[in-house]
Image (spheres, rainbow, N blue to C red):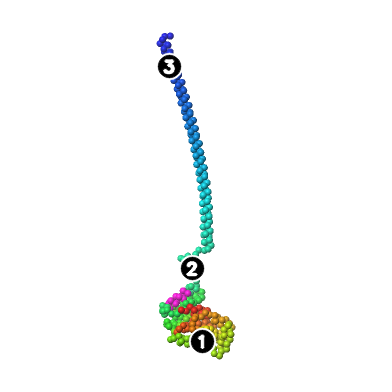
Amino acid sequence: MRLWEKIAVTGGILATLAAGTMVANKVTTDKQSSEFTISEVKKSSSSKVSKNSSQKEKSKETSNQVSSQVSSSQANSSQISSSQVNTNTNAKTASSSSVAQGPAVSSQVQAPKPAETLAQDRLSQNNLAISQIYGDIPLIRNIDVPSGRILNASINGDRNDYSVTYGLGSVATELNADPNFVPLVSLSVTTYGSASEAQANLQANVIDTTGLPVENIAGQTVSVDAGAGQRYYSWQTGNWYANVHTSVVDGSDANVAEKIQAVANVTKPQTSLGVVDYMANGAKLSWQEGSKVYHVTADSLAQASQAAMSVK
């Protein structure tokens, strides 16, 4: 073999060996790179797994904390709800108690006036009309008015000597404007020149009992005057003289004891001289105040007494 051929063969062999070495080195390098890559992947995967595991633990802890907070919140909510229920229950109980007790009468809603108040208002209206004409004069200030009736009034005379009649009507009218009203209570006032003259005129209403027989009736020592079926019972209590007139004909004499007892107990104005006349058709109280003499007449003794006591 020629020299140049040997050199060529040797070069080829060396090249082949070099190429093999390069290939081997590359394979080794690739193998190491692959192993490194696999190692990194494993490390990365392990790190991710560890990190995920840590996150899961944190998530679990967070979940536990949230659950704890939810449980605490639910407990607080339960307590608040219970408190609200108790509060609402107490409020309902208080409201129920208020309803049970009943609300106070509203100041904006006025209850209807009772009949007594309406009658008193009507009496005040009549007296006001009288005072506008006669000035400030003594008048009756209290009268019992039957339910459903209206009180009207009429007057005549002057401020020194006058007579006022309060009567029942169906409609309210002005003073002296109801000619058909039914008289209920009347007051007459007479002014004399002096107190002694007034007393003398009033004394004329006192029955002289001299020589009359005396009976004890209803605890009173009573003088009795009888004739023509009529009977007159007279007695004195303090400054007041009393006369009870009954009739055997109409049977009013049968309950004379009750009438005498009623007169003895009736309330009378304070006076230096007064006379009570209790008759079959009504009663009259007369008394003196200075130079004036008052007469109050009514259908009943009680009404006459009530009206007389209210005169001012």
Residue 76 x/y as whole percent: 51, 49
Position of the N terminus, as image quadrant, is top left
Asked if residue 168 shows in the view, the reply is no
| Rendered view: 2 above or below 228 | above
Secondary structure, magenta segment, majority class? helix
Q: Quadrant of residue 246?
A: bottom right
Q: Quadrant of residue 157?
A: bottom left
Q: Residues within 10 Å of mark 1 (few under 14, many from 20)?
A: some
The magenta stretch is: 120-130
Instruction: Kindly give the residue lying farthest to the top in the view shown.
Output: 1
Confirm whether the magenta stretch covers residue 238. Answer: no
Residue bearing mark 3:
15
- Disc sitting over residue 111 in the figure: 2
The residues bearing labels 3 and 1 have C-alpha atoms spaced at a distance of 181 Å
Residue 281 x/y as whole percent: 53, 82
Q: Amino acid at mark 2?
A: Ala
The residues bearing labels 3 and 2 have C-alpha atoms spaced at a distance of 133 Å
- Disc sitting over residue 206 in the figure: 1
Asked if residue 7 shows in the view, the reply is yes
What residue is at 45 percent from the left and 75 percent from the top? 124
Q: Dot 2 lies on which element? A: loop
